[in-house]
Image (cartoon, rainbow, N blue to C red):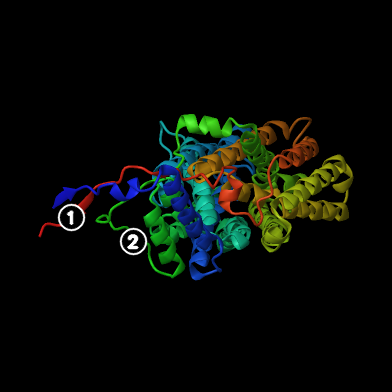
């Protein structure tokens, strides 16, 4: 092959401003096709592929809530892990998630959504198998190995947040963007539910083995149980991996970051018609002259008060809700035991089985009665009410609910009837988290930032959220036993109420995104976004 270069004679007939105007109109017309597209099989595919990853995220995160009790029986011959051990096992994944969100968020804007989508799932699968097969040796403690593997899983989980959010938002049409993104994130509720369901099935399956075990050999049975529970979390990821790796690049990345308008226009047509996007390396590439990501440009964009205010609002809102969401989610078994819900009245091995069984049932109730319905209420109303009203409503309601749970804790746990009222309010808190900020904090950062920083900014916001999860878990573990076993739980609930109140104020910093295109929300002048063209790339001409 010989390489020839296209001359720029045709471009010289137009001034840069005229060329920029023409190309800008073509860009806006191409994006309008995405923004106005009807719901299609491709949109459904995006929901499912993103949702399976988020399902796996939730399963891996919350399975440890039940597995930790199993680990306590196996390695400490008690119903709960020592405080430091419990903290290490539960905080490792959120800590890894912070790293993954920042890393993959940045990589998504540098290399593209498609190139990294699936890599985070591979990391999760490897880390999950590693946990299930972990062992100990004279120089290696099993808990230390588990913490290391769970940190790795956290990196993969962290990478999934910005990747799935940005791909969902950039392919979605404006009218249904909120529903597409909330449908994907709703899979987290099913991941939480499935973790509890699998634990319940495993516990029931091994019931006879536990009860008939001589002496302390029941720990061998429970050792199998927690490995099966954790290991099952790899299966959905394996099933979704192929589809992750074959998702096309988003037209917005191709257009605004690779600055290849022609290829993006072709991709849009291919996706909307149900075909596969195709990259032709033999075709001349003309790059549009548009804002390009750089450290100086990043500082200039977020250095503006109105843009930094939005980033702070999305980041702090996520931090605030994760204080409560993970404070409750990773410790629901502790709270249920603290209020005496399902406390085993038996002794010996029967008590071991009943304790595990009750924890599973309690978590199933919490998922079905609160978590899952909350996601779908958001799905139903997010493109009718808007993101901001739902988030404000959620934070306000949660402030009130946690005040009642905290300040009324002693009264609500006096009798069996009172305990039922506590469980109802606890389920209501889970419901309002998901019919509220736990969904909207995922959606809004995937909408309000420019394409060149959308993945990075979402990663920053999500990482702040998981820092809240780390703070919540550290605080819960260190504070809950002040004054006696679980005596400080009521004050922890009061602390949650304070953070929910601060979330009300951070919500006021974010704009309403419903019904607006991603370009409108970027707070950049779209009329002069394209300045013209840059130097054309070489065209390969086959030898004759």
- Give me the disc on residue 455: none
Tag 2's secondary structure?
A: loop
Distance from label 2 to label 1 (Cα)? 19 Å
Name the one closer to the observer, 168 or 281: 281
* Quadrant of the image occupied by residue 196: bottom right
Image position of 318 (left or right of 289): right
- Give me the disc on residue 541: 1
Name the one closer to the observer, 3 or 229: 3
Q: Are marks 2 and 1 in contact (CB under 8 Å)?
A: no
How crowded pointer 1 is (Cα within 10 Å; few <14, some 14-19, many 20+) is rated as: few
> Farthest residue in the front direction?
13
Residue 137 horizontal/vertical position (percent): 41, 36
Note whether 443 is above or below 368 in the view shown. above
Name the one closer to the observer, 18 or 109: 18
* Total number of numbered discs in the rendering: 2
Residue at x 86%, y 48% (from the top left corner): 412
Image position of 503 (left or right of 168): right
> From where the camera sits, is residue 129 visible?
no
Residue 224 horizontal/vertical position (percent): 49, 53
Note whether 364 is above or below 336 in the view shown. below
User: Badge 2 is on which residue?
Assistant: 278
Image position of 268 (left or right of 411): left
Quadrant occupied by the C terminus: bottom left
Residue 254 horizontal/vertical position (percent): 41, 51
Image position of 371 (left or right of 104): right
């Amino acid at each position: 092959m010989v390489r020839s270069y296209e001359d720029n004679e045709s471009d010289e007939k137009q001034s840069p401003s005229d060329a920029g105007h023409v190309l800008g109109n073509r860009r806006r017309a191409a994006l309008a096709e995405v923004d106005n597209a009807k719901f299609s099989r491709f949109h459904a595919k995006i929901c499912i592929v993103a949702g399976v990853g988020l399902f796996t995220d939730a399963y891996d995160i919350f399975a440890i809530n039940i597995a930790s009790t199993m680990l306590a029986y196996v390695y400490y011959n008690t119903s709960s892990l020592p405080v430091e051990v419990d903290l290490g096992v539960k905080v490792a994944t959120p800590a890894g998630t912070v790293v993954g969100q920042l890393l993959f968020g940045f990589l998504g804007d540098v290399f593209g959504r498609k190139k990294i989508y699936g890599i985070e799932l591979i990391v999760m699968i490897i880390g999950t198998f590693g946990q299930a097969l972990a062992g100990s040796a004279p120089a290696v403690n099993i808990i230390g190995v588990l913490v290391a593997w769970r940190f790795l899983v956290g990196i993969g989980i962290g990478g999934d947040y910005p990747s799935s959010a940005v791909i969902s938002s950039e392919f979605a049409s404006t009218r249904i963007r909120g529903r597409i993104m909330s449908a994907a994130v709703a899979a987290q509720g099913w991941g939480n539910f499935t973790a509890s369901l699998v634990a319940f099935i495993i516990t029931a399956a091994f019931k006879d083995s536990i009860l008939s075990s001589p002496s302390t050999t029941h720990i061998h049975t429970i050792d199998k149980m927690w490995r099966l529970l954790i290991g099952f979390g790899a299966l959905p990821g394996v099933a979704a991996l192929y589809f992750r790796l074959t998702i096309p690049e988003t037209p917005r990345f191709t257009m605004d970051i690779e600055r290849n308008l022609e290829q993006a226009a072709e991709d849009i047509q291919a996706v909307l018609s149900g075909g596969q996007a195709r990259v032709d390396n033999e075709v001349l590439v003309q790059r549009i002259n548009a804002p390009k990501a750089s450290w100086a440009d990043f500082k200039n964009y977020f250095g503006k008060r109105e843009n930094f205010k939005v980033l702070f609002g999305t980041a702090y809102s996520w931090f605030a809700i994760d204080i409560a969401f993970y404070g409750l989610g990773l410790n629901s078994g502790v709270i249920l035991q603290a209020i005496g819900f399902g406390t085993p009245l038996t002794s010996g091995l029967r008590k071991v089985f009943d304790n595990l069984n009750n924890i599973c049932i309690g978590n199933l109730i919490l998922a079905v009665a609160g978590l899952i319905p909350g996601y779908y209420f958001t799905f139903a109303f997010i493109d009718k009410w808007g993101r901001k009203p739902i988030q404000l409503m959620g934070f306000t309601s949660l402030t009130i609910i946690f005040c009642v749970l905290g300040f009324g804790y002693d009264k609500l746990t006096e009798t069996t009837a009172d305990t039922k009222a506590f469980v109802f309010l606890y389920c209501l808190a889970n419901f309002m988290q998901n019919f509220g900020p736990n969904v909207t904090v995922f959606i809004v950062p995937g909408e309000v930032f420019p394409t060149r920083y959308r993945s990075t900014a979402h990663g920053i916001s999500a990482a702040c959220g998981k820092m809240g999860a780390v703070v919540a878990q550290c605080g819960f573990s260190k504070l809950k036993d002040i004054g006696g076993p679980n005596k400080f739980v009521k004050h922890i609930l009061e602390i949650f109420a304070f953070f929910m109140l601060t979330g009300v104020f951070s919500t006021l910093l974010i704009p309403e995104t419903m019904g607006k295109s991603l370009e409108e929300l970027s707070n950049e002048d779209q009329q002069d976004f394209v300045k013209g063209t840059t130097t054309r790339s070489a065209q390969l001409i086959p030898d004759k």
